[in-house]
Amino acid sequence: MKKKSSAQYYKENPESQAKKYAYQKKYNAQPEQRAKRAELVKVNRDKGTYGNGDGKDASHTKNGIVMKKASINRGSKTDMPGDRKTRGGKK
């Protein structure tokens, strides 16, 4: 049996989706998260990739800030220990 994606789950469970989005809104408004995003935007602007449609994104990794394809950066599972812990992987 094929597993459902999280997108399918949240589409079928609007109450869960609303709860998730409320949490994300609160989390992303934290000063630390705002500073982290601002840092990445600054790097993107400095490198000339901000808004030019090249598909590149600045990403925080264990090796510092690196440029990646945006599609790869969105679901990055191995860059940071926190990512692995959140997804239940090796610690």
Image: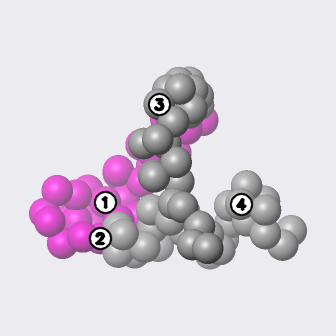
Instruction: Identify the residue shown where x is 36% and y is 69%.
Output: 71
Image-based side of 49 in relation to 19, left or right: left
Which label lies toward us, 2 or 4?
Answer: 4
- Density class for disc 4 (Cα within 10 Å; few <14, some 14-19, many ≥20) is few
Which of discs 3 and 2 lies nearer the camera? The answer is 3
Question: Can you say whether 38 is above or below 48 in the image?
Answer: above
Q: Dot 2: what SS?
A: strand
Judge depth for marks 3 and 4 and give the one in front.
Answer: 3
Q: Which mark is residue 14?
A: 3
In the rendered structure, which segment of residues is drawn in magenta? 31-58
Amino acid tagged 3: Pro
Write down the residue under mark 1.
44
Tell me residue 5's x, y (percent).
Answer: 51, 60
Depicted 66 relative to depicted 36: above or below: below
Expressed as whole percent of the image width and height from the top left, the position of residue 16 reads 57, 32
Residue that lies at the very extreme toward the front in this rendered image: 1
Task: Point out the frontmost of discs 4 and 1.
Answer: 4
Quick one: label 3 or label 1, which is nearer the N terminus? 3
In the image, 9 versus 76, the foreground residue is 9
Under circle 4, the secondary element is loop
Query: Farthest residue toward the left?
Result: 52
Distance in Å between CA atoms under marks 3 and 4: 22 Å
Q: CA distance from mark 3 to mark 2?
A: 32 Å
Instruction: Judge by depth and name the residue closer to the eye, 20 or 28.
Output: 20
Type of the residue with mark 2: Lys
Mark number displayed over residue 56: 2
Q: Which residue is mark 4?
A: 87
* Scheme of colours in the image: one colour
